[in-house]
Amino acid sequence: MDQPVFIAGLGVISAIGNTVAQNRLSLEQEKTGIAPIQYLDTEHRDEFPVGEVKLSNDELAGLSGFKRGISRTAMLSLIAAREALTDTGITNLAGLRTGFISANTVGGMDKTENFFRDFLSDNTKGRLRNVVNHECGAITNLVADQLGIRHYVGTISTACSSSANAIMYGARLIKNNMLDVVIAGGTDALTRFTLNGFNTLMILDKQPCQPFDANRRGLNLGEGAGYVVLVSKRIVSALKKELYCSLSGYHNTNDAYHQTASSPEGTGSLLAMEGALKKSGLQTADIGYINLHGTGTQNNDSSEGAAIGKLFAGYSPKMSSTKAFTGHTLGASGGIEAVFSALAVQRGLLYPNLRFEKQMEGFPFTPETRFSMQPEIKHVLSNSFGFGGNCSSLIFSKL
Amino acid sequence: MYIKAASNISPQNTFGNQPYLSELAEYTGEQLTCIEPEYKTLIDPKLIRRMSRIIKMGVATGMDCLHQAGINAPDAIITGTAYGCLADTNTFLSKMVQQNEDALSPTPFIQSTHNTISAQIALLLQCHQYNNTFVNGGASFENALLDAMMLLYEGTAANVLVGGIDEITANSHAILKRMGLYRRFPVSNFELLNIPGEGTMAGEGAAFFMLSQEASGNDWAKIEGVSSFYKPRSIAEIQQHINTFLLTRHIDINEIDLVITGNNGDLKNDTVYGQLQQYDFANIPAINYKALCGEYPTSSAFAMWLAAHEIKNGVCSFVPQSNQIPLKKVLIYNHYQNIHHSLILLSAC
């Protein structure tokens, strides 16, 4: 039953580019996407830098093909999911059991916020079309309809680990011989709801964030979408394009420590990484690069650092958080970072941890500070941890 | 796969050892509201104060289910909820708009996250195992159930806690009402399905199940399968899904002893059920369940509780004595707004 699952297509849109090629170029050129708020309509506009996709809603409508007025979450999703599907070279889904497993945490909240301005003063007011896609699942449906996928549609929401769990669920649907092809990942748009929510938790950095740095001050929120196309071994021979890598390991755990804070010793993160290694049959020393969850908050980075310090004791793994480029894209982060990880393992790309200056106390490793090519990378570990203690790790392996 | 235990907070007296059928709750108007238990014996009172209604209902049924099964360390906790924690979302969103993004409290934001119920149960149990939350509209519970069944099949879990939860809030109801989901004239839930019209009645509920790979000798029922399908284009496609679902499980439709369908009293919505009852389900005793719990995206969790409950009792309480046959196989067919359709098949152990 445990047949391998391969990655045959990638798609991403984030603060550092609207396509996989643009994202890769920004990563190689060490160009951050963190900037003052340009598009989000908020009172905190001049207070917090963010990782916005550098397109207005009208421009996103044009690019996605959705009509104007659709949630930004859906537009980002469609652009990246379509790029991923196109990338596989599969032109006809008929005859293939195809699934779309998409994660998000905000749903159509960007539109609901506008609706509530009118609705709260008079509950007969506000345009219904602005709340009709409020649910997370409605965003997935909108995109599935555009992609022409009906065989299996699923939506996951486990906070910041959401899209890592979507990829894991997608892989298991293939392994259980229920599907042949799964577009899996996630999407999230910046909203006032999340910006204000994270602000109440006092974990937003007023400067560009510095993940895994001793002087880190918090996270920058970002937005975007990232999807991988998972395929079964059975259909690989029918593909005309080279595969990126395999998804060799994954594991989902719970930290069970606090609703929003991670345990100091990183219990959940350690169990997730250990479980993923076990699933892939790999040893700690096999991991050539760790794409950190690395949000830039005091709590996450020290907790994740504690777990990595313990698991990789005696080794010197290379690692970085790409959130210094994209910001923390919440429900999309596992998907976006899966795309980065697949590229890293296929091409031997080692991304820098931008703005890293000072080593965290007690943490034995130093994140990468410059972009480099490392063709010897065989396996990449990607971490995604979230509110509610949800921890998931994925491992991507070279073919 | 076996249903070792089940727990259900619904608009009926379904929680605990209540004789829910002898005292069916009647509601007249637009909605059916959950009958909530005394939470003090189920959850630490210090924690209850901070929990919103949906979190209390979800955590209470989840914990009760574990308690019944005698399991305090499940191998996975999985929930399905279309809307998530609406009350907390509403509080944070409303304050944010009213206070112009100023001086907000973090608590409702923290608890608005869709995975809060799974997370709270894990936290109470100190359970570090697999934890997932599906938010897939009318197939949220079905996604969760499939995940649970795959975990058991893969052999990575022996006992999985899985549930479906959704709540009604004043604002969500006002919005859905404006979208035309509910009856414009008050009707009793007892009459809802007898007097078809435009719209249905809103419902809500929290139902959890403890699923095990191994039989315990005291299980409620066995799960034979779950399948969901998306936006079928025709009745023929729905029929094909049902046939394939049964065929792959080597079951003839005539072996089904009872069909539980998701009729909700809305003429347009119920057309599908009518057609199936005329042909495919014509010779099978059929009951429906939304007169008991109302319409909501995870109502199939209520239906699964009902099916398991009837199987456990051996006979169907809604079928006249004279027509009673022992329940061996029960099929649930539901769709939510013709978007997500689903089939769940249970059998006697």
Image (tube, rainbow, N blue to C red):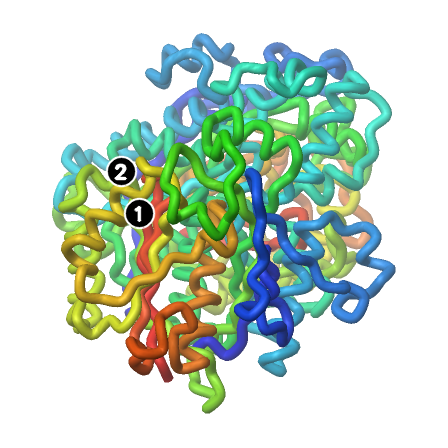
Residue A79 point in image, percent of width and height: 38, 24
Residue A171 point in image, percent of width and height: 36, 55
Between the residue at mark 1 and the residue at mark 2, the CA separation in whole angstroms equals 7 Å
Q: Is residue A387 above or below residue A69?
A: below
- Find disc 2 in the rendering and name its residue: A149
Q: Secondary structure at mark 2?
A: loop
Residue B122 point in image, percent of width and height: 66, 63
At a point 35% along the width and 61% down the height, the residue shown is B287
In front of the other: A326 or B163:
B163
Seen from this angle, which residue lies furthest bottom? B217
Q: Which mark is residue A152?
A: 1
Residue A290 point in image, percent of width and height: 55, 49
Q: Is residue B214 visible?
A: yes
Q: Secondary structure at mark 1?
A: strand
Q: Are marks 1 and 2 in contact (CB under 8 Å)?
A: yes
At a point 82% along the width and 58% down the height, the residue shown is B47
Q: Residues within 10 Å of mark 1 (few under 14, many from 20)?
A: many
Q: Residues within 10 Å of mark 2 (few under 14, many from 20)?
A: many
Q: Chain of mark 1?
A: A
